[in-house]
Amino acid sequence: MRSAPAQRKRKQLSAADLPWKRVKTGFVSGAEDEVAGGLLDFEEVDDVQVITELDESGNKHFRFLVAEAEPEKETATPTAKPSSIKKRTKDTKAEQIRHEDDTASTSAQPDDAEPASGTADADQLLREFDFAHLPGYVPQSLHPALAHAMLELGFSKPTPIQRATFDIMLGADAVLKDIMGIAQTGSGKTLAYGLPILDQIFRQNARWPSKEQPRKLTALILLPTRELAMQVKTHLATVITNASSAGIDTKGKGKGPYPFANIVAVVGGISVLKQRRQLAVDRGIDIIVATPGRLWEMIDDDDDLARKIAALDYLVLDEADRMVQAGHFVELDKILDLTRRGNSSSISHDSSAPDVDIADQDKPDDQAFAEQSVRPNGNPRMRTMIFSATLSKDLQVNLSIPHLRNLRAIRKAGGSQGAIDDLLLKIDFRDPDPALINLSSMQGTVDTLQECFVDCMMTEKDLYLYYFLIRYPGRTIVFLSAIDGIRRLQPIFKALRMQVVPLHSGMQQKARLRSLEQFKANKHAILLATDVAARGLDVPLVDHVVHYQIPRSADVYIHRSGRTARAGREGVSLQLCSPDEKVAQRALLRSINKEKALVELPIEHSILETLRDRVDLARKIDSAQHKANKETHDQDWLRKAAKEMEIDIDSEESASDEPSDRGHRGSRIRKARGQAQQLQAELDRLIQQPLRIRGVSAKYLTSGSHAFVDDLLASKNHAAVLGLSASTAVGDVKARSRKEKPPREEAHHA
Ligand SMILES: Nc1ncnc2c1ncn2[C@@H]1O[C@H](COP(=O)(O)OP(=O)(O)OP(=O)(O)O)[C@@H](O)[C@H]1O
């Protein structure tokens, strides 16, 4: 039991004035030490009474009471909670916490952390958690430590997909249900499946994991890309950290006495050895978040891991449709095989199991599959959850068991199905009637997204992209269909002094994570990305998404556009459309019922020529640099080849590359570099000249017809373009939309 601290006189201080002490974090699970880059620090403070008060409008206010030196005999206020509070020194807002990267790890505690004692007090406090703070949750349905975490993160209401999932999966009445959830991008699907899993882990484990009481692998969450897997791991880790630090800290080590969960990401790009170590920790792992390729690599020569996967309680396929497309199917298939039930003899008749007839719905077929399986002996009580923003119609329709039977019959008869059908057949739903939660709109994208386009020639896309980025500064993702496009655009926009960072599958994992960090850290950053970033990436406050090419399918368009306008915020999606893409664009818009919904982005044409000069110069710089790089590369190649062949290229005998040639090459390199530098200086001069719209003179601010002086005085002027007001892309597209499509009444009156 935790001994009650002697009562001492306390004084009230603001949160900022508390005696915070820096905490050294030790990472043990996941790949956080590879990706943290020292971006986060923790501070903690001891022996502070936190008094929570509600004002008349129901808002919470906190008072912090710190002990003074002299002990006193006064009794404590009954509502006060002595606690250890953690804060982040560089990211204080809950908003930022919820979007934080892997540095917010489950394992911010030392590996050898002892379970804290004093759980009686702690349980008492948690039992008293007031669910009035969490409207939308069924009281007591969520483990109180998780309820506390939701409050800490500012997620006081579940989103619609969360509420629908929780209704089925959380609480005393929860039944064994398999779920397929479809909801718009940014609608909180991660916690929709994540909280029920954490709830079970927290309830089944009263203490911190230890060697003596290692954890059972409860859940496997599969995702199509490394970034997504890391992001989901981080998201859940943030919840775990907040939950397990709820309440009392008895030893000042920053750990609470509440249950804890170990979560590990298993993804490519991180050393296999290291991941093996992480998975082999004595205290066990509760959740694995993985991409199928790497996970299978690990399972393939680790029977123990294979057995754990077979015994899972939860299997989650996030972005399942994408996983099938992304060529992960072979590995996914093998992993799913492990989770399938064997024949009926392996099904346990656990009397505590929910009363659902899970066995033998399709016994003959199951047995047929069992014969093909690697080691089919899956947990008969496993629940499967499939989530996406865009599940194909086929997948939705075919989920019911009769349809699955039908599919199997077709398959037996030698009929061929698509990859999604194959995936469905491979999933051994324990539930005869999986729940379908479909909250997707007919149009796929969210209401807070403003969609627009620019019609331009293929060769003008750089110019219009530059225009958009100058006109509407903000965090922007530009999607390109191929890596080559990114490699071409990046140096051009760098020369234009824009803050561009690349993200594509041709990059090393560390470089990918670094790019994401840079993008997150800078509110004017521009991410040039392929579709590796299209799905699920939850970067806070992305203002705009630009489709440099028209996406090839509605799914791609919806997922790419869904990187902005997340969690109820507004955002803009812009399509750059060349004449030969018009047909594809029409087909795309037809498929999402938006043929007439997109408006043209308003353009201030009078600055285009100046911008064109800049873009042309940037292209010239790029080609001069390219030339210099090529010559350097040729020279290096020659040296390397000569070295390998043990030829001295500087000796007289080496006639293959005459000294005069070498001299010429050197001077060509110097010339090209000099030219690039000269052009860059010229471009820098151009960039420094203010942009002005037609009719505005820099000398005579009051000239012209624009009332921009008023704007200037009211600080409403655009920061880089004289004569333009600092409107947002969202505002301008909305205004254009209102103009083009007046509401019915107004149109009628007109
Ligand atoms: N109950 C909630 N209240 C407020 N914000 C929430 C809530 N639940 C989750 N969020 C936040 O909403 C954002 C989007 O969540 P998430 O990434 O889970 O969306 P998603 O539906 O999986 O999106 P996508 O389909 O694009 O992958 C995250 O930043 C998350 O922290």
Image (spheres, helix red, strand yellow):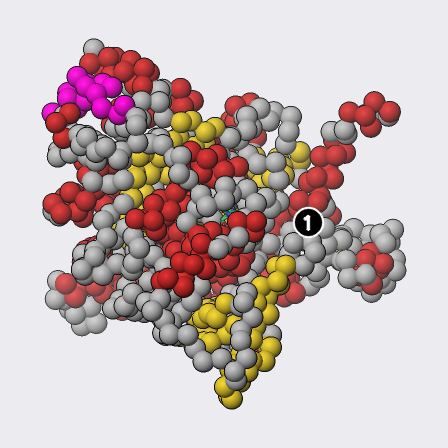
Q: Amino acid at mark 1?
A: Thr
Q: Nearer the viewer, residue 541 or 628?
A: 541
| Quadrant location of the C terminus in the rendered image | top right
The residue at 58%/63% (across/down) is 52
Q: Nearer the viewer, residue 604 or 355?
A: 355
**Is residue 222 placed above or below 364 in the rendered structure?**
below
Q: Residue at x 67, y 35 (%)?
A: 600
Residue position for label 1: 728
Horizontally, residue 368 falls left or right of residue 557, namely left
Is 298 contained in the magenta span?
A: no
361 drawn magenta = yes
| Residue 693, above or below 595 | below
* Residue 324 rendering spot, x and y as whole percentages: 32, 32
Secondary structure category for the residue under label 1: loop
Residue 55: tell me if it is visible: yes
Q: Nearer the viewer, residue 107 or 100?
A: 107
Q: Is residue 565 above or below residue 351?
A: below
Residue 133, percent across and down?
56, 51
Whether residue 481 is visible here, answered yes or no, is: no
Magenta extent: 357-373
Q: Residue at x 56, y 58 (%)?
A: 523
For the N terminus, the quadrant is bottom left
